[in-house]
Amino acid sequence: MSPIGEFLPAAAQQKATPTYTNLVHGRDFPDPFVLAYRGKFYAYATQNSDAGFQVMDSPDLVRWTHRGASYKPPWSSAHYWAPEVVTHRGRFYMTYSALNPQTKKHDIAVATADNPLGPFTHRAILVRGDNNRVGVIDTTVFFDADQRPYLVYSEEEPRGSSCAAWPPSAFGGGRGDGTHASRPA
């Protein structure tokens, strides 16, 4: 027994369960989102290069393995921001924003995959930042009691949040109109 062990209660001398420590990942992994799926955790993040979105996985939120890039949007080459992944009917849907090379504003898009690690495939640009000075960013998806998806996002300037009924076609359903459910006044 170590000299310190003589002063610790028996419970403290037992092997400790791994716990969170800062930093979880000491490298470039900004704006993360964590998805819990089938007993594992998947973290998706932006990065400071144009290599696309990166992903890590963990069995316990303590030990993480970096898996590299999960997706690089084919329609943009810059500002890959704030990925979020949800599951719906056995598929993975990544929403994110990226810089539109023509308008120089941020648009919101969706990509899908059959595996949480990817690879993800581009499906659609859901919201264009055209009616905004800078663009639209920071998506999240909300499912109501009927499993209808709603896309919530922020308009960069003027600053505010907006909520749109997501087009069902983006989730493999019929045609949708992307009707705005609410907008800042």
Image (spheres, rainbow, N blue to C red):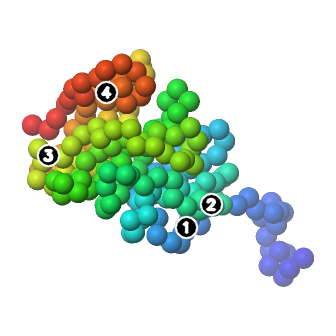
Q: Marks 2 and 3, Cα distance to the nearest angstrom?
A: 38 Å
User: Image point 37% across, 52% down: which residue?
Assistant: 74
Judging by the rendered image, the residue that carries numbered circle 2 is: 64
Judging by the rendered image, the residue that carries numbered circle 4 is: 167
Residue neighbourhood size for the residue with mark 2, other residues' Cα within 10 Å, grouped as few (<14), some (14–19), many (≥20): some
Q: What residue type is labelled 2?
A: Trp
Q: What residue type is labelled 1?
A: His
Residue 122 x %, y %: 40, 43
Task: Using the image, tell me which numbered label, if any, was put on residue 25.
Answer: 1
Nearer the observer, 12 or 83: 83
Q: Tell me which numbered mark, 2 or 3, is placed earlier along the sequence.
A: 2
Circles 1 and 2: CB atoms closer than 8 Å: yes
Q: Marks 2 and 4, Cα distance to the nearest angstrom?
A: 34 Å
Mark 2 against mark 3, which lies toward the viewer? 3
Circles 2 and 4: CB atoms closer than 8 Å: no
Circles 1 and 3: CB atoms closer than 8 Å: no
Q: Tell me which numbered mark, 1 or 2, is placed earlier along the sequence.
A: 1
Q: Marks 1 and 3, Cα distance to the nearest angstrom?
A: 36 Å
